[in-house]
Amino acid sequence: MSNKEINSFQDNIRRTFIWYSLIPVIAIVFTAILLFVCIWSIYTGAANKKDNLDIGTDISAILDNYYELVFNCEKAMLKSKDDVKASEDEFFRELYSHTEKYSSIGKLVILSPKREVLFSSEGSVPECLTEEEYDNWGVWNRMRSNPERTETILYEKNLYVARGIHKRSGLAYAIVYVVPTSVISDIIYKRNRYCAVTDANGWVYLNNTQGLTDEFGQINELFEGHNGIAKIGGVKYVSYESSIPAGLNIFTFSDINRNLSIMLIITAVIAVIFVAIIVITYRSTAKSSEIYTRDVKKIEKAFEAVQNGDLNVGLRIDSSKEFQTIGNDFNKMLGGLKTQIEQNKILAENVAFAQVKRLESQFNPHFLFNTLDNIRFMAKIDAAAADKMIVSLSGLLRYSIRETREEVTVREDLDNLQNYLNILQIRFNKRFEYNINVSEDIKDCLIPKLLVQPLLENSIKYGFGEKEKLTVNINGYQLQDKLIFVCEDDGVGIDAETLAGIKMQLIDLDTEHQHIGLYNIHQRIKLMYKGDYGLDITSKEGEGTVVRLVLPVRM
């Protein structure tokens, strides 16, 4: 006997008050902190994403405007029959029309296939457009590779909108617009957010902060294809990447280091507050715990009465809401206990009834007579077969009569089923075939004893009819938290009226039924497992029958 001192009820109440007053508050506060962090993370990511998409939309609108400028210049050339001199006024008109709302008009250049400048809105022209060494690189390469397409090209830190005009003889001339850097940078800086604009290969065109690119001038590989939190040089960023039709990638970033520091400070302050709450609560509960111990004797007597077998006792407490709750819960518990006892009694009666009926259906005189008669016949012509039938029959009887457990493993029930199948195969020979496909991962699960055999027996009993041959397939598998067993035969099937009657019998669990095997399986499952479990049968006359069992997964 243990000599450990048991705490008084008053001390236990005091500890309970402390426990149930502090834990919910702590849970709520830390849940609120967690919720705040989650909302902050979602908001930060959403705001970053919105700015990214807005920047992309604005840049796309500008580039679309420049695309239109290049296209209109091409139309002006066509009107003047490719006479650049005759189209200069139209070029300037289009240039000013499309750039007047921006801080810079940029530079419009028209070149011949030999890189000769036919028109330039400004004096100087980038070398990459005129020098022979660039003929197969950058802008010229893209224009020759994509005839009659307007391309956005990033080359040597400059952004070009270029279109090669091709005739039958090849490239006739090129229209190139040098995008002013200030126009794009104005979009980035007005968002007040870290941002980088790159081409499809990661080469940076614009970047308004340090540390986001590598030594070659490309965006840091940690950001490419990654939306979320990334750490560069000790700084944590929330990053988002998007692409625009012009072939540029937009990267936006939020520096979250400062916000994380603020949250750590808030967490420290909350921890100090909780320490103070714990001290105050501990002292205040000493007196209040005395008030809620007056009805202990009444509760003790009620429990003693239950211990002595009196389940009709009840508690009526009006002194405090807490003890009133205890009294009500005690009364509900007794009611539930009585209900459970009644259900257990019904379950025990039904289990006994099911066991008797199973033996009756599985080992009735007709079955035993046929089996013994087959053994007598086989003993004369095939002693080995007769011996196998005797051993199998013995195994069936031993499993059904001596095995007292109500639940067995799937493996054990299948082992017993094999004895039954041995007898059937010898009895029906080639007229009967079967396939058993049960997943290995469910063979250690618990199921009601003799669950599968009645399914097979039902197929044999009602499936043959006038048919010469019968095939039965038994499948077992796990679907989420349920075990599924399916017994399918290609027998004569069941007509619609009889099938409807069987289904009504399965629904009505309080009357006698003709299909004892199926009914007992369904009744046992319903009583043993609370939930959406049981037996279902479908059949079509002339095509066969499918019986499906659904059980909980129990190891």
Image: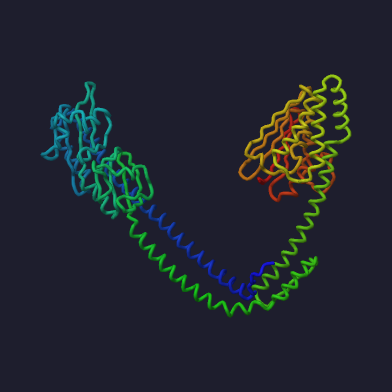
Image x and y of residue 418, in percent: 74, 32
Q: Quadrant of residue 545?
A: top right
The residue nearer to you, when weighing 391 against 425, is: 391
Horizontal relation, residue 207 to residue 517: left or right: left
Residue that appears at 70% across and 71% down? 327
- The colour style of the image is rainbow
| Total number of numbered discs in the rendering | 0
Q: Quadrant of residue 81?
A: top left
Residue that appears at 84% across and 22% down? 378
Question: As drawn, which residue projects farthest toward the top?
Answer: 381
Look at the picture and state if 503 lies above or below 46: above
Whether residue 249 can be seen here: yes
The residue nearer to you, when weighing 151 against 435, is: 435
Q: Quadrant of residue 200?
A: top left
Horizontal relation, residue 517 to residue 325: left or right: right
Image x and y of residue 430, in percent: 76, 22
Residue that appears at 72% across and 34% down? 487
Look at the picture and state if 443 lies above or below 145: below
Image x and y of residue 445, in percent: 67, 43
Whether residue 94 can be seen here: no
The residue nearer to you, when weighing 97 against 251, is: 251
Look at the picture and state if 98 lies above or below 19: above
Q: Quadrant of the N terminus?
A: bottom right
Look at the picture and state if 12 lies above or below 487: below
Residue that appears at 70% across and 30% down? 473
The residue nearer to you, when weighing 126 against 544, is: 544
Horizontal relation, residue 294 to residue 458: left or right: left
Image x and y of residue 185, in percent: 24, 49
